[in-house]
Image (cartoon, rainbow, N blue to C red):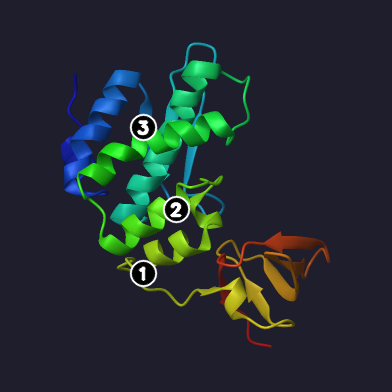
Amino acid sequence: MQDYSATLKKYMPEEAAPIISNWINHTRCLFKISRSRSTKLGDYRAPFKGSPHRISVNHDLNSYSFLITTIHEFAHLQTWNKHQHRVKPHGTEWKNNFKELMEPFLKLNIFPIDISSAIHRYMENPAASSCTDLHLFRTLKSYDTVKTSALTVESLEDGHFFKLKNGRSFQRIEKIRKRYKCMELNSKRMYLFNPIAEVFLLEQ
């Protein structure tokens, strides 16, 4: 079996790399370190017509975010192996698998105390993405080493204009429950944004 630890430890805590390497070998998963994607941190694709399990994780995440995203995607793989498409993507089965796969890393004390505390809180009811848990997301973001001029949608005010990395421009309209209603300037269509979606302020 190939040892992927040397490559993996460039992106995640060193102690975690051998465990993830074993997972890749055991599941015969095609694991890809991906370019940055603004819409998702990682991705899982089930086997199809002879192709293996496929997991990709964005290369530019900090080491703790990279590891948590990797565990998230392997929980999808484990759920598919047990249930295929018979259960919801982030249903009870996935949540139980995520908790099970996270356990060895918590026992190794890989995470700083604040992240570990946020993970324990998140694991009470894991969501579709760590980005949807604002406390965990903010805690993980504090460990980013590369600082950008990006703001979050929640830090703007209603009426402010902003753009995404891909150049699409919006205006924040109002808060609706936990998300923000924003209008795309070109199409005038309305979209709901996560409060901590990263955007860039447009000067008017």
Number of residues whose C-alpha sits closer than 10 Å to that of mark 1, classed few (under 14), some (14–19) or many (20 or more) = few
> What residue occupies the far top of the structure in this picture?
50
Q: Earlier in the sequence, mark 2 or mark 3?
A: 3
Up the image or down, 137 lies above or below 93; here it is below
Which residue corresponds to the image point at 53% horizontal and 28% vertical from the top-left? 93
Q: Which mark is residue 36?
A: 2
> Distance of mark 1 from mark 2, alpha carbons?
19 Å
Which residue, given by chain and number where applicable, does mark 3 sit on?
Answer: 31
Q: Is label 3 in a helix, a strand or a loop?
A: strand
Q: Is label 1 in a helix, a strand or a loop?
A: loop
In the rendered image, residue 80, in percent from the top left (x then y), is placed at 51, 22
| Residue type, label 1 | Ser
> Distance of mark 2 from mark 3, alpha carbons?
15 Å
Up the image or down, 137 lies above or below 94; here it is below
Q: Earlier in the sequence, mark 1 or mark 3?
A: 3
Which residue, given by chain and number where applicable, does mark 1 sit on?
Answer: 142
Label 1–label 2 contact, CB within 8 A: no
In the rendered image, residue 21, in percent from the top left (x then y), is placed at 24, 31
Using residue 194 as the reference point, say whether residue 73 is left or right of it: left
> What residue occupies the far bottom of the structure in this picture?
204
Number of residues whose C-alpha sits closer than 10 Å to that of mark 3, classed few (under 14), some (14–19) or many (20 or more) = some
Up the image or down, 108 lies above or below 158; here it is above
| Residue type, label 3 | Phe
Label 1–label 3 contact, CB within 8 A: no
Please tell me which residue lies in front, 14 or 123: 123
| Residue type, label 2 | Ser
Q: Which mark is residue 14?
A: none
Kindly indicate the quadrant of the structure image that contains residue 33.
Answer: top left
Which residue corresponds to the image point at 16% horizontal and 39% vertical from the top-left? 6
